Amino acid sequence: NDAKLMGGQLCLTNPDVLRIVTENLLKDLREHPEWQIIDFSQNDNTRYCQCDRCAAVDEEEGSHAGTLIRFINAVAEEIEKEFPNVLVQTFAYQYTRKAPKITKARHNVLIRYCTIEACFRHPLTDETCTKNGTIFSDELREWKDKCHQISVWDYSVNYSCFAAPFPNLIALRENLRFFAECGATHVYEEDTSPGSNRAGGAYPELKAYLISKLEWNPYMSDEEYESHMNGFLAAYYGKGWQEIKKYIEFEHAMTADRHFGCFERVDSSAIHKCDDGARWNEIAETFDPKAYQEPHPNSPLSKLVDRLDEAEAFYDRAYALAETEEQRKHITRNKMAFDYLRLFCTPHDKSSMTAEEQAAYEIAVQDYLRKRTEYNFFHNLFTARRKH
């Protein structure tokens, strides 16, 4: 548009952009008449257009969603003429997360609200959570008044460290109910891909199961939620399932006063130490946890790490009660979350260790890395792009 336009996003007040986008979306729909939803959303960066026209609209609307929704409304109006049953979907994400003050989305526009900046240890409606407060709950309620159709893109994993525990079972249940109360017709829980990564804390399979149940019935009672949890634990872990249940309660108690985002720092890997943006992805993608790496000084898992013996004991007792090799495999694989914490998130001062202690520790590290490959674990979002 002019020199103020920054690369990464379109200028949404440029009439040529509107024409080109509309033409392309109509072309796609003509080629796929079976589609009921077509998406046009911002790119995954915050480099929005800052030209005078876009800036003026955003200032008037009190949000960068102002230019977006006016643009999407114009596109949706044209699409409705030829495809009256198609919804035009767009993200409310990062800089467009806050609803515009004036403009409402048309009836054939589907808003997909994204929670990427939230704390997932606490519900979005938990006003005592200093990270969530009323920010996300207020924004979702505002969107409820500014659109006819709403969807939610939520996050249920720590992309900075797949292996470490991610205590979100309390927030999951409360958030799914809140999404339903806000009129969400669809919720997508972004997690790891089971085909490429099996790491996901101490009970990733349970989490996936509970998400599926909550998606079907977000209004379930406490008793129903407990019943679904207990039923899965018993089927998956065997006779020792109650020990796993006790651990889950223990994990949530140890983290009650901490925040967990979906890019939470729980270790001191190189991914968090690189200030050179050009090399950040390269370093992150090639990262491997190393013996003797420095623990993160303010990990939200610090209380759990301090009582790691207790955490592991729950899984040891469950293992002792297991009756099948499949159950033992489930427990061993999930227990790798604690192996990671013990090996890479607790202090190991080489200078103060005996030769025997060093050898035992280094063997344990190599054994973890071997099992990581065996179980198809990746360390973080970026290492998942490479192959073992």
Image (spheres, rainbow, N blue to C red):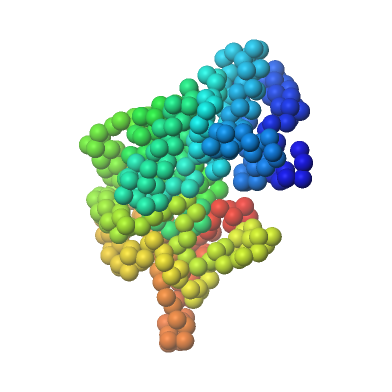
Question: Is residue 386 shown above or below 68?
Answer: below
Q: Residue at x 48, y 27 (%)?
A: 146
Query: Percent x, y for residue 309?
Result: 30, 68
Where is residue 254, by image quadrant?
bottom left
Q: Nearer the viewer, residue 267 or 216?
A: 267
- Decide if residue 9 is on the left or right side of residue 117: right
Q: Nearer the viewer, residue 62 or 307?
A: 62
Q: Where the N terminus falls, by quadrant?
A: top right
Query: Percent x, y for residue 285?
Result: 62, 59
Q: Nearer the viewer, residue 352 or 64?
A: 64
Q: Which residue ends up furthest to the left in the rendered image?
A: 223
Q: Is residue 319 visible?
A: no
Where is residue 156, by image quadrant?
top left
Q: Residue at x 71, y 27 (%)?
A: 18
Question: Is residue 170 shown above or below 305?
Answer: above
Q: Where the C terminus falls, by quadrant?
A: bottom right
Q: Nearer the viewer, residue 134 or 33?
A: 134
Q: Is residue 304 visible?
A: yes
Q: Residue at x 58, y 18 (%)?
A: 86
